């Protein structure tokens, strides 16, 4: 049985006990390989309390953990973020160094190496495993304008991108190594966590009446995600309509409880209608379907080129009409039948118009809801894992 090494980005642990979009997708193909063993996997991941208990469920995967506190990873991660964003300097932070050191010490051979979204790991690993590196790219961090992007491209055997948008960005360097692998979700598992009873319970929890139309935003609460613009649009709507609510679901970074200056600004901006704009804070992924069930319409107002947010797929699985910004790979996830697309340049006004349209037209909401359910079938977990393993098989055939 061929051996595949998987190295994650260094943020959250595998298995994904702390959530995370990338981490959840990794879980999917590792779990599928447990059901239908094809390969022996080995994973390098950051550590979190409780993760080792979860690993006992795996017979065809070995897990190696880097303890963040021990190696000063947290400090290094923030330094890396600053240097990358402000100075565009690729830095080998502590997680990378520790992974490389462990791999060299263990002297294990692998038939293929999958680097999950961490482009900075590609070149160091390519020195150890030349011609074996697959970069699974979830963000726009390999293109002609990114420092080190060309070398990263050259050091990869292939690059899997989560959307055609990300593929087009990599293609600014070259077009013969990239292939799109769309994200997926466990549709049945997600739906099972919600019901009409759940909807009533969630609405009661958030003090939402049965006849109120509820908009939901789900994701990281930060400037890039357009939450301020959404609140501004909702505030104008609330002056005209009494029976509407807005759920803001998420935190600044996954399970963080910290109120950043941006979140404090949003709370202040919401003060006039604080009973109608509800900040839930971080919600564990296993409870997200329940929260979605309280909503009628999902809004994804990203103000940057969002690669392929899972939240769009989650909302469609729950049968929610979509209002989305024309950003990155988002338009690839939706259709004209289930989504109203808005431009970022005039987003507050266009959000307000789209939300007004859906408030006033229940039949349109229902037809878009049906279209969302249909559209979500394209992003089923089975499709994702089938396509993933098909690509892996092709690597060994070439």
Image (spheres, grey):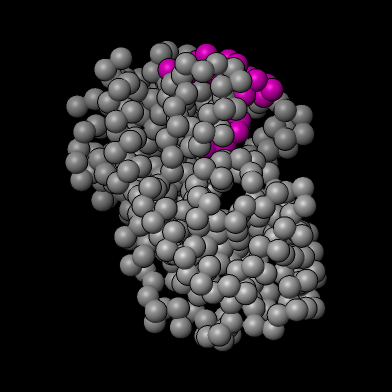
Residue 94 or 269: which is nearer the viewer?
Answer: 269
User: Considering the image in quadrants, where does the N terminus appear?
Assistant: top left
Q: Is residue 75 magenta?
A: no
Residue 123 lies left or right of residue 396; in this view the side is right
User: Considering the image in quadrants, where does the C terminus appear?
Assistant: top left
The residue that appears at 37% across and 36% down in the rendered structure is 43
Q: Is residue 145 magenta?
A: yes
Residue 240 or 387: which is nearer the viewer?
Answer: 240
The residue that appears at 65% across and 20% down in the rendered structure is 144
Residue 228 lies left or right of residue 198; in this view the side is right
Residue 261: percent from left, percent from top: 78, 59
Residue stretch rendered in magenta on the structure: 136-157
> In the image, is residue 165 above or below residue 214?
above
Residue 395: percent from left, percent from top: 32, 21
Residue 82: percent from left, percent from top: 73, 37
Q: Is residue 128 visible?
A: no
Residue 362: percent from left, percent from top: 54, 74
> In the image, is residue 176 above or below residue 12?
above
The residue that appears at 37% across and 69% down in the rendered structure is 193
């Amino acid at each position: 049985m061929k051996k595949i090494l998987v190295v994650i980005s260094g943020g959250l642990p595998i298995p994904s006990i702390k959530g995370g979009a990338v981490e959840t997708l990794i879980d999917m193909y590792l779990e599928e390989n447990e059901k239908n063993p094809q390969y022996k996997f080995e994973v390098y991941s950051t550590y979190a309390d409780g993760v080792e208990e979860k690993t006992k469920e795996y017979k065809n995967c070995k897990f190696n953990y880097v303890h963040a506190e021990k190696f000063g990873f947290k400090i290094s991660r923030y330094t890396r973020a600053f240097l990358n964003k402000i100075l565009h300097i690729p830095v080998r932070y502590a997680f990378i160094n520790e992974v490389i050191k462990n791999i060299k010490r263990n002297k294990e051979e692998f038939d293929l190496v999958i680097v999950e979204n961490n482009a900075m790991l590609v070149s160091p690993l390519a020195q150890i495993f030349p011609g074996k590196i697959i970069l699974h790219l979830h963000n726009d961090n390999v293109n002609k304008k990114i420092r080190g992007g060309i070398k990263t491209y050259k050091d990869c055997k292939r690059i899997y991108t989560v959307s055609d948008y990300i593929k087009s960005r990599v293609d600014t360097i070259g077009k013969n190594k990239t292939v799109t692998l769309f994200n997926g979700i466990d549709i049945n598992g997600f739906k099972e966590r919600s019901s009409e009873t759940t909807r009533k319970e969630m609405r009661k929890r958030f003090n939402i009446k049965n006849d109120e139309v509820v908009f939901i935003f789900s994701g990281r609460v930060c400037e890039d995600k357009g939450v301020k613009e959404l609140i501004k649009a909702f505030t104008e709507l609330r002056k005209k309509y009494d029976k509407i609510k807005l759920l803001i679901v998420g935190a600044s970074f996954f399970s963080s409880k910290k109120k950043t200056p941006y979140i404090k600004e949003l709370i202040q901006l919401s003060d006039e209608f604080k009973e109608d704009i509800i900040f839930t804070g971080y919600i564990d992924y296993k409870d997200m379907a329940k929260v979605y069930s309280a909503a009628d319409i999902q809004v994804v107002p990203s103000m940057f080129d969002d690669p392929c947010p899972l939240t769009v797929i989650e909302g469609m699985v729950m049968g929610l009409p979509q209002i989305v910004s024309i950003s990155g790979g988002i338009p690839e996830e939706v259709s004209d039948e289930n989504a109203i697309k808005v431009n970022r340049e005039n987003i507050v006004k266009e959000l307000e118009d789209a939300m007004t349209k859906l408030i006033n037209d229940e039949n349109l909401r229902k037809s878009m809801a049906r279209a969302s359910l249909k559209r979500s079938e394209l992003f089923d977990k089975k499709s994702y894992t089938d396509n993933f393993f098909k690509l892996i098989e092709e690597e060994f055939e070439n």
